[in-house]
Image (spheres, grey):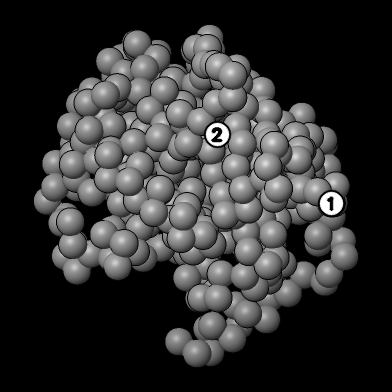
Amino acid sequence: MSGHEHPTAPLTEAIERIGRRAASADAEAAFSEETLADLGASGLLHAMVPPEAGGLGFTDGQFCAAAVSLGAACLSTAYVWVMHCQQADLVFRHGSPVVRKAARKVIDDGQLLCSVTTERQGADTLYPGIATANTSLAAGRSPGSWLLQRDAPVVSAARHAGAFLVTAAGADSNTVTMAWVPASATLDGVAGMRKCSPLNGMRATENRSLVLEAEGDEDLLIGGALGFSGVAKARWSRLAHLGWAASWVGAAAHVIEQATGGPARKRFARRRAVGSMPRASLARAVWELESVTGALLRHQQELSGETTGIRVNEHVTVRSNLLKVGASETCFRVVDSVVADIGAPALAPGSDIERHWRDLRMTALVTRNDALLVGTGNLLSLRAYQMRTLVEDLWAS
């Protein structure tokens, strides 16, 4: 695989196949082997792997474009893929040579990098699962090694993971670290996996509850001099918000396309419940979606501009958090308005609109919006809100 070519045709064909099986994957609540194979063969698993490591080296803009297309096809797949890319981006920017080599093998073998950050959450947590990590690294059995035990209630697509990146408290209780844990690494056979009850939305993420017990050394801890918390605030969490928001935009845009040009068009066009209200609500829905797209593009440009990977601009953090909240709420509201205008036929089991409607309802719970808003409000209360960067950008353009 070469990072010097942009294989749009294989990507497009793979995403189309994933879309064709999305309804059955949703019905079966399974992240299928075929979908994973499509992600691997198309190069999408290598999207955020740099070219010198055998990857495609996607820019943040290309990452968003792929997320939009995957979100339109299957939001469950998009969610899992974004999280895999988030871990790959972290590993190849901040992992040791040992971890980077291991990650490349996992990805080359067509397996996922899965994140384990599920924790007890506080209402005022800015980074749920990071700042409130309740699992600590203990001293290992050899000098300089560590032991980790984790009981994680929800890990998406865990059955397909080649490795887990697991958050834990460091030796200093005020720091958080992330450990590289191969899927095969267990002590005394303690580790295990159980299938969770399917959710109403994003069912095809095939969540599993996971028990891990592993041992490693400092080479398997990720974060460098700043530690994982610094890296997470600078880019890691922002990249997830960016990719998720892009996938939600893709799903909502697909629903509008279905309503205006797909099988639902005639039903949508006939409805005149209150004068021309359906057409007015359509225009309003498109405006809301365009507004989210504008915020998405702005954040993508901001994130790409922070080339060091360690600088933490808290005004950008605020916009990242608000993008996640605003995109999740707005994209669902857009789809819900289309459903209301089309009527009951929009929610026919197995339809794309019905599936996206359920999937988007879940997005407010992916890093809970209420906790994220409280934490963002805390940041805003400490610093004056600034419009300066927007004005500077407009003058520069």
In this rendering, the answer to whether 379 lies above or below 214 is below
Q: Nearer the viewer, mark 1 or mark 2?
A: 1
Residue sitting nearer the eye, 308 or 258 = 308
- Res. 211 in view: yes
In this rendering, the answer to whether 122 lies above or below 238 is above
- Quadrant of the snapshot with the N terminus: bottom left
**Helix, strand or loop at disc 2?**
helix
Q: Residue at x 18, y 41 (%)?
A: 41
Q: Residue at x 68, y 28 (%)?
A: 149
Q: Is residue 247 left or right of residue 62?
A: right
For label 2, the residue is 363
The tag on residue 172 is 1
Amino acid carrying label 1: it is: Asp
Q: Is residue 126 left or right of residue 341?
A: right
Q: Are marks 1 and 2 in contact (CB under 8 Å)?
A: no
Q: Residue at x 18, y 32 (%)?
A: 17
Residues at marks 1 and 2, CA–CA distance in whole angstroms? 33 Å
Q: Could you say which quadrant of the image residue 310 lies in?
A: bottom right
Q: Earlier in the sequence, mark 1 or mark 2?
A: 1
- For label 2, the crowd category at 10 Å Cα-Cα, with few meaning under 14, some 14 to 19 and many 20 or more, is many
Residue sitting nearer the eye, 260 or 357 = 357
Residue 73 placement (x, y as % from top left): 29, 35
Residue sitting nearer the eye, 176 or 380 = 176
Residue 269 placement (x, y as % from top left): 28, 30
In this rendering, the answer to whether 383 lies above or below 28 is below
- Quadrant of the snapshot with the C terminus: bottom left
- Res. 317 in view: no
The tag on residue 395 is none
Amino acid carrying label 2: it is: Thr
**Helix, strand or loop at disc 1?**
loop
